[in-house]
Amino acid sequence: MKVGIHVVDDPRHKEFVNKYYRILEENGIPVIWLDINQTDFWDQVKRLDYFIYRWSHWVDHQQIAKSILPVIEFNHNIKCFPDYKTCWHFDDKIKQYYLLNSLGFPVAESWIFWDKHKAMEWIDQAEFPQVFKLRGGASSYSVLLVNSAMQAKRLVKKMFTGGFYPYKVMMKGSLTSTPYRTIRRIAKSIWNRLLDKENPYWAVHKNYILFQKFMPGNDFDTRVNIIGDRAFAFRRFNRKNDFRSSGSGLVDYQTDEINHKFIEIAFEISKALRFQSMAYDFLWDTNHDPVLCEISYTFVDRNVYDCPGYWDPQLNFHEGNYWPQHCQLMDLLGVQDLKPVSF
């Protein structure tokens, strides 16, 4: 058994990936670091049984992952984490909506247009507020509450001309009472200084528009992380005077506050679509039905570790703290007695 792990260059991602290496090393499982920039990369890949590349939102990560993972998984028949089924829709809310909605899973109602004129026609008969999102982004960046048709049309014009860079659409904090032009002015002032420096978010988003149904009355969302037959769940509360919870840092781990409907739905989707690992963000619809806002194969590992335990598919609770990397490796390698490592 031999495992290859692709290097990452950002300290935040490196800390996550290093845990895979440490766990394998402590368990005596041969593991090597790989880099697509090495001239012997593919020769080394051929000697592997498993390959891990924890890629993230960064454009350069995406380019590498989409170029090498399908070749390694399908042409070299090497088990990968993440595999194609798990990650082809990562950081793309449009792909996620098309996938989940087409299969009848409860996903937040959305309106997606690839034509400017069709979008404008929809705005004329739509009710507001609505939520505008870019297809990519995390921690509530690239998300706006649109309170009027005028604001919506401005966004459409922008998306079908120059477009937006991810993480340049808005600033953290409340947007419910901040004029759209003020948001743009503040964001432009700060980001123009940053654009002169190396920046991983270079790909501009344009020539589409995504609106999602606004669901008032949700003071928090419920995140359910499914890793194999384990469900780790916690609540994330909204920022003060805001409608967004992702990235707020206001996390509640009380297990008796977790609605089991969310866990059941998350297990059902992961089983049906054969996801290795997936985070599901749930809200309550206006009819008090559970709905998904988005999904992500990767996430902050500390939040999972800080959960007091996990539920199995029969909703039995198992106490303990578990690093997601340990759970993912047990499933990938088929080694259920993998020795845990302290970090």
Image (cartoon, rainbow, N blue to C red):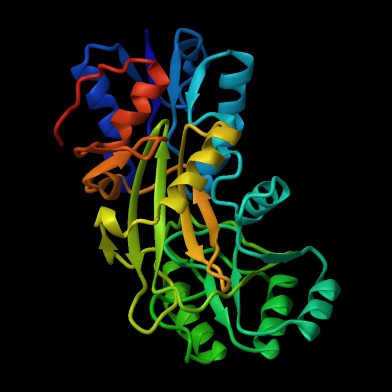
Image quarter for residue 136? bottom right
Determine the residue located farthest toward the left in the rendered image: 342
Looking at this view, is 259 or 130 the one in front? Answer: 259
Q: Looking at the picture, tell me which residue is in the foreground, 298 or 251.
A: 251
Q: Is residue 146 above or below residue 78?
A: below
Q: Would you place residue 319 above or below residue 98 in this image? A: above
Along the line of sight, which residue is nearer the eye, 200 or 121?
Answer: 121
Q: How far across and how far down the image is residue 338, in percent?
A: 25, 19
Q: Position of residue 38 (x, y in %)?
A: 45, 23
Task: Name which residue lies at 29% across and 64% down.
Answer: 249
Which residue appears at 56% of the width and 90% of the height? 181
Quarter of the image with the N terminus is: top left
Q: Nearer the viewer, residue 193 or 90?
A: 90
Task: Report x, y in % for residue 184.
Answer: 53, 83
Side (left or right) of 33 relative to 61: left
Q: Is residue 295 left or right of residue 232?
A: right
Whether residue 151 is situated above or below residue 255 in the rendered picture: below
- Quadrant in which the C terminus appears: top left
Please identify the quarter of the rendering in which residue 226 is found: top left
Q: Is residue 176 above or below residue 307?
A: below
Q: Is residue 116 visible?
A: yes
- Residue 106 relative to residue 321: left or right: right
Please tell me which residue is depicted at 57% across the width and 13% down the height of the picture: 77
From the viewer's perspective, tell me whether residue 53 is left or right of residue 343: right
Residue 10 in view: no
Residue 307 point in image, percent of width and height: 25, 47
